[in-house]
Image (cartoon, rainbow, N blue to C red):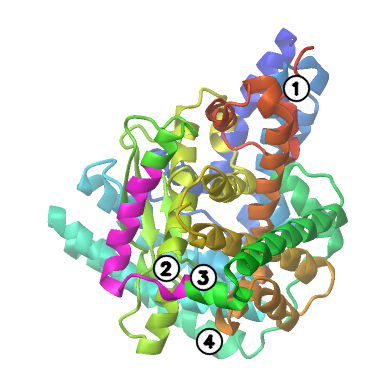
Amino acid sequence: MSGTAASGIDEIEREIVDHLFVLQPGYAVGLGLHEYDGRVPDLSAAATDRWAADADRLLARLRAIEERSLSTDRRLDRLLLQLLLEGPLFDLRDSRELDRNPMSFVGSISLTSYLAREYAPVEARVEAIVATLESVPRLLEQGRSRLTGPLPRPFVELALAIGGGLPAHFGEAETFATRAHLQSKVAAARAVAERALAPFLAWLQEEALPRATPEFALGGERYQRLLFVREGIRDPVEELRKAGVADLARNQARLGEIARAEGVPVDELLGRLHRDHPSAPDVLPTAQKFVEETRRFVESHELATVPAEASCRVEETPVYGRALSTASMNPPGPFDTTSTEGIYYVTPVDPKWTPVQAEEWLRSFSYPMLRNITVHEVYPGHYLQFLHFRRSSGSLARKVYLSPSFVEGWAHYAEQLAIEQGLGRENSAAEVAQIHDALLRDCRLLVSIGLHTQGMTLEAATGLFQREAHFERLPAEREAVRGTFNPEYFCYTLGKLEILKLRSRVLRSHFEGRLGLFHDRLLGYGCPPIGRLGSLFPPAAN
């Protein structure tokens, strides 16, 4: 790499990252950069237009640095920096998220980063909470100003669900502040936020919802562009669809084999899977038990290095996040120097639900299903992944860039890996649970492509989840609706397939068949775009 090229990319790397965080300070906080605590971005049209113009200028400078003049590592970093700018530009100009999706506003009002981790004294975290709450009126006013046209109905309905949970979330912050006797300060800021939130939600309910449109699709050209700006993928959409169809067929065939071996229909096999579940009070303790079990499994089978400092606790999903999440992981960020603890959120039974609704929810947390979820979220899934991410010695660009398909693809791959290595081998339930989730992810890929590029209707998408993933009507509808605002839920299957393809190519030639070495090396790269995964492992010398 020439000295001029090296100094050029070194100089612009920090500028690009700093510019990204102007638009997305919450992302910086999630990475562990707490100097951004309490900052809420200016999302007015004038401000985002200025941001986009500055991003264009940074991209022009970055493109002027010739790729061939850089080392192999810095070539990848150049691409990551490009995607860190092109991704938000796509959201602003192509998908126009701030002009058509109210979730962009209510969904960004989160205090979880300040409540969940003991990274600073309570007083400092309360200061960030207050600053965030006091910014809510300006943020929602900007939303009202931008969300002028008929909005996609699913976006409005989910924004209402998220917004409806925010007052309880604000209440959690007020309770937290009692630890430093600062609850009155948070209460005052909370009142400011809720006075702004109530009319915004009323406007969504009374004006935006009646005028809502069923139109939401990106279209083929923008969808293809999305694949590049998120993942560096240039493969045609049709090739990805065919890969999804093939994986769906493979998983269905294996499920059929198990059913035939046990002499029952597939539906009975799945019904049996869901019936054996913990009681509502036992869901979280059971999840904690599985955290310890899966850690021991990873260590005993040498699937990857588990750092000695690893520690993960299970908590209820914050109220405002329950509309969109069954379970999730809040991992330590790569820049977090105060804690390595993971927080595994599990959504509990809502006390307002009927016994029938509660039973339906608990069926999704059957023992085999909850263990598979734990594999995905904790070991060897997301939590282990982010422990390696924060220990990696890569560049600033690699510490900041997160490929959705690598993040979710790794965790989905971890589910299959655990079954391959014998987790739950005592009966077929563990594998059936893993296949059930794999069918869901296959259908997400196909529905994402269908909804956004092929004119698939929500009803047809719901039917696909019912028919191919064996979902009941209500969860199938929920999955279909998710595809309208989150086309990137293709990421699970897409990422898993790329990791499997890479493993098939390099495990023997580079790592003598030792899975732990392969996984440690792969996770050491951070969260690279899956479109470039193969370039990280050049062919072995003969």
Q: Is residue 281 above or below residue 15?
A: below
Q: Is residue 177 above or below residue 165?
A: above
Estimate the spatial distance between the alpha carbons at disc 2 and disc 3, rounded to whole Å: 40 Å
Toward which corner of the image does residue 169 lie, by quadrant?
bottom left
Estimate the spatial distance between the alpha carbons at disc 4 and disc 3, rounded to whole Å: 16 Å
Residue beneath label 3, please? Answer: 141
Residue 381: x and y, percent? 49, 45
Q: Quadrant of the N terminus?
A: top right
Structural crowding at the residue carrying mark 4, measured as other residues with C-alpha within 10 Å and reported as few (<14), some (14–19) or many (≥20): some
Residue 311: x and y, percent? 31, 41
What amino acid is found at the position of numbered circle 2 in the picture? Answer: Phe
Residue beneath label 1, please? Answer: 538
Look at 79% across and 12% down and name the residue there. 542
Secondary structure, magenta segment, majority class? helix
Residue 364: x and y, percent? 46, 71
Toward which corner of the image does residue 232 lie, by quadrant?
top right
Magenta stretch: give its range.
Answer: 273-295
Residue beneath label 4, please? Answer: 205
Find numbered disc 3 in the image and state the secondary structure of the residue it sits on. Answer: helix
Residue beneath label 2, please? Answer: 365
Find numbered disc 2 in the image and state the secondary structure of the residue it sits on. Answer: loop
Front-most of residues 428 and 274: 428
